[in-house]
Amino acid sequence: MKHASSTGSRLDRWTSQPQSVRVAATLLLAGLLIPSAMLASQTPLPRQMQPARDGSHRAAPATGSLRGRIVAADGGRPIKRAVVRVESRALSMSRAAITGSDGSYELSGLSEGDYTVVASKEAFVSLEYGQTRYQGHGSPIHLTVGAVVDHVDFALPRGGVVTGSVVDESGEPMVGATVSSLRSRFSLGQRRLIPSNSAMARTDDLGQFRVYGLEPGRYVLMATVTASLVTDDEHNADGFAPTYFPSGDTPGQARPLTFIAGQTIDNVDLVMRLGRKATIAGIAVDSQGLVMASCQVTLQKVGGSLSSYLSAGQTDADGAFEIKNVEPGQYIVIVKATRGERLEIASARLSVNGSDVFGLRVASLPNARLEGRIIADGEGSAPAPSDIRIVATPESPDEVAAERGTVARNNFSFSLNITAQPIFIRAADKSGNWFVKSITVRGVDFTDSPIDLSRSLDLTDIQISLTKRPSRLTGTIQNWTSAQGPFVMVVFAKNQERWSYLSRYIKVGRSDQDGRVAIVGLPAGEYYAAAIDVLEDGDEGDPEFLRGLVSRARTLTIAEDEVKDILLPPGRS
């Protein structure tokens, strides 16, 4: 599902996600530099009606309702058992409804606020309400107290379909192979191939597959198998490495497929080749030199071609581990253990080229302890301590598994432990009312700079200053009308050194029903601002993408806690 909000940055969205989501052991992230021209289709969607507001219900109790109907875009047939989900800051969790046989739904008991409404159904393309282009976003619906908003209707296009087969070099069918559809996304500091939702399938006894529900755009197909062929030597095994259509060993050898709405592409055949797989064996020790017994072992594949996290079992009572059937590539072996308040993370980088690796020693870095205090700027009410989450994130995206977080205590102090390495410290307020003003250590500003913990294992005087008076930037497009549909405003620093991983100087906002965008919390500085029709998730972090916006952006300067309105030029991508 897509998530839309009127304000936000890459860091805000990143730190708000649970760590289990960011470091899911089963998530495959394959990296591939793909030119901008290969990115998503911007084919317009059928126009959706503006919701009608039933004024006769405004005297109702202080809760509102959204209701509408879901139909198929090709012919208008009602879609039953479609899921309609709403998200809002006014809700502690998302709400959902299921359409009836006539395609209708109603969500009631909603508080006043701005709601993002998303409709989905298997084999169809999911859409946000107000979305006019694929891979785009819609506009939030503002619900007032007691209001009933009618005709929040959707016409869902049928998703694309790809069929084909997976065979080995001799043409024998590969039974039980997984075929995944991947899309280019900029994530964790580089462009990668990311699995597209649940669009994957397993081959049958004939090696055939059918992947459906693909939204228009460009995809790479990848086939994987888990089985290996073991020889008499228990350490030696042959297996099939991931294969990219038609028969590539790396993403760079892939031939992408481009889909339009509802298109079916048949006879897409992938050929997998048998290769040598290796065994990695060694021992894990913590920062005190003690063996890490019965601890989780993870194998992370890194580098420009592929990045993934794969569970690799546990260490034994002596801290020893063995990982079999490892295909060629660059890896990090990660072993985790909890020692009281300390999280020990032992890791070692290595290259695998088909030969076994024995005697690997995986050692944990020392733990650093961070202690500090939250300072609320200004007079009046203070934030709720339990709403303030403090996160220490490694500077290197490859080390994101070591990220640690905590919430402030009742006295606004905090402490956490993390492996000693360069980190960024960030803080976020769950209520959305408080923003980081500065982060200092012993009077030195580290708000936008990494702290090298290898030089000091104990930092006891971190001060995080929060303000309730952040900068507020509101923008609209010159001569905008509702017929033009929603748009996205991208605001980014003029200084390209600020276009970095975890930057606070890049934010995006999506227009509301009145064609206005609000962005809150930009640090003081000089910026570009541009309006575009479609922003794919993560593109705002891609320096190449930002450079392409400069020529049609307007420039502006934002002062600390300044409130500013800007008018954007009408040119949009």
Image (cartoon, rainbow, N blue to C red):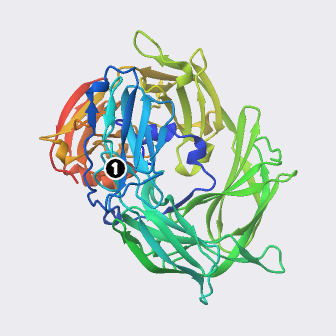
- The image quadrant of residue 271 is bottom right
Looking at the image, residue 459 sits to the left or right of residue 158; the answer is: right
State whether residue 459 appears in this view: no
> Which amino acid lies under the numbered mark 1 shown in the image of this protein?
Phe
Q: Which residue occupies 61% across, 76% down?
A: 204
Q: Is residue 343 left or right of residue 256?
A: right
Classify 463 as above or below 47.
Answer: above
Q: Is residue 518 left or right of residue 389?
A: left
Q: Disc 1 designates what residue?
A: 154
Q: Residue furthest right?
A: 317
Direction from residue 425 to residue 362 in the image, left or right: right
* Position of residue 321 measured from the top left corner of the image (x, y, whole percent): 80, 58
Q: Secondary structure at mark 1?
A: strand
Q: Position of residue 280 (x, y in %)?
A: 74, 65
Residue 17 % position (x, y): 52, 40
> Which image quadrant for residue 32?
bottom left
- Residue closest to the far top: 380
* Residue 117: image location, x then y, percent: 39, 42
Q: Quadrant of residue 170?
A: bottom right
408 over 169 or under it: above or below:
above
Image point (20%, 46%), residue name: 553
In percent of the image, x 34 and y 47: which residue is there? 137
Q: Nearer the viewer, residue 250 or 70?
A: 70
Q: How many marks?
A: 1
